[in-house]
Image: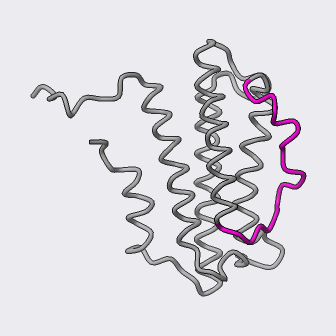
């Protein structure tokens, strides 16, 4: 059965990959918003990073990799890189702002590297490998965050988490 106009795939594979990156960040920010007020201090165990530190670590890693692998697309990063990797920021709105900013930096670096037909400078043969690594890395920490919250007595029930995580991945664009 042929696709009708409203069932067509994105124009390019790159569009679909960048959409997956945008969805990944939406899910991460949604998870942050689902964390209870005192949940940012939760840790899986003594010595582990707290939930707030994991979110800021994700932001930090995004910016460091762009600064190393695509510095020409983010010349201001040298002056704006966080000084610390694991910061226990207590303001969820500030964390969301940081994540949204670094997600845009990654998106544009990948898009521009592909447009320039250039591999990443240091770590990856192709910009898509960088994007996939970021998604994998953030999924790893997503699980750690949910585990830390559960162990601290603040589980996020599936009925609450599902609509803001899995459904974001699976929804069809209208």
Asked if 122 appears above or below 58 in the picture, the reply is above
> For residue 66, what is the image quadrant?
top right
> For residue 81, what is the image quadrant?
top right
Point out the image quarter for the N terminus: top left
Asked if residue 109 lies left or right of residue 68, the reply is left
> For residue 4, what is the image quadrant?
top left
Point out the image quarter for the C terminus: top left
Residue extent of the magenta highlight: 73-92
Q: Residue 129 appears at what percent x and percent y?
A: 62, 31
Whether the magenta-drawn stretch holds residue 26 is answered as no
Q: Residue at x 62, y 21 (%)?
A: 112
Q: Residue at x 46, y 38 (%)?
A: 19
Of residue 127 and residue 96, the one placed in the foreground of this image is: 96
Q: Residue at x 82, y 63 (%)?
A: 87
Asked if 99 appears above or below 106 in the picture, the reply is below
Q: Residue 18 appears at what percent x and percent y?
A: 50, 34
Which residue is farthest left?
A: 1
Asked if 65 appears above or below 139 in the picture, the reply is above
Q: Residue 56 appears at what percent x and percent y?
A: 74, 58
Q: Residue 171 appears at what percent x and percent y?
A: 32, 50
Counting every numbered tag in the picture gives 0
Of residue 80 and residue 7, the one placed in the foreground of this image is: 80
Asked if residue 97 lies left or right of residue 85, the reply is left
Asked if residue 174 lies left or right of residue 40, the reply is left
For the stretch drawn in magenta, the main secondary structure is loop
Q: Residue at x 58, y 15 (%)?
A: 115
Which residue is farthest top?
A: 117
Whether the magenta-drawn stretch holds residue 85 is answered as yes
Asked if residue 137 lies left or right of residue 4, the reply is right
Tell me how the rendering is colored. one colour
Asked if 118 appears above or below 166 in the picture, the reply is above
């Amino acid at each position: 059965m042929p696709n009708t106009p409203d069932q067509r795939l994105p124009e390019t594979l790159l569009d679909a990959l960048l959409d997956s990156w945008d969805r990944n960040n939406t899910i991460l920010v949604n998870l942050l918003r689902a964390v209870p007020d005192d949940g940012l201090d939760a840790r899986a165990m003594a010595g582990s990073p707290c939930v707030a530190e994991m979110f800021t670590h994700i932001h930090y890693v995004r910016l460091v990799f762009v600064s190393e692998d695509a510095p020409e697309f983010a010349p201001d990063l040298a002056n704006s890189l966080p000084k610390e990797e694991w910061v226990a920021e207590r303001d969820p709105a500030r964390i969301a702002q940081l994540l949204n900013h670094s997600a845009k930096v990654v998106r544009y670096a990948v898009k521009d590297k592909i447009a320039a037909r250039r591999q990443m400078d240091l770590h990856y043969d192709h910009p898509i490998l960088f994007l996939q690594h970021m998604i994998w890395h953030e999924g790893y920490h997503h699980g750690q965050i949910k585990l830390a919250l559960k162990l601290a007595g603040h589980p996020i029930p599936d009925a609450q988490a599902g609509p803001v995580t899995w459904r974001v991945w699976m929804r069809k664009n209208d």
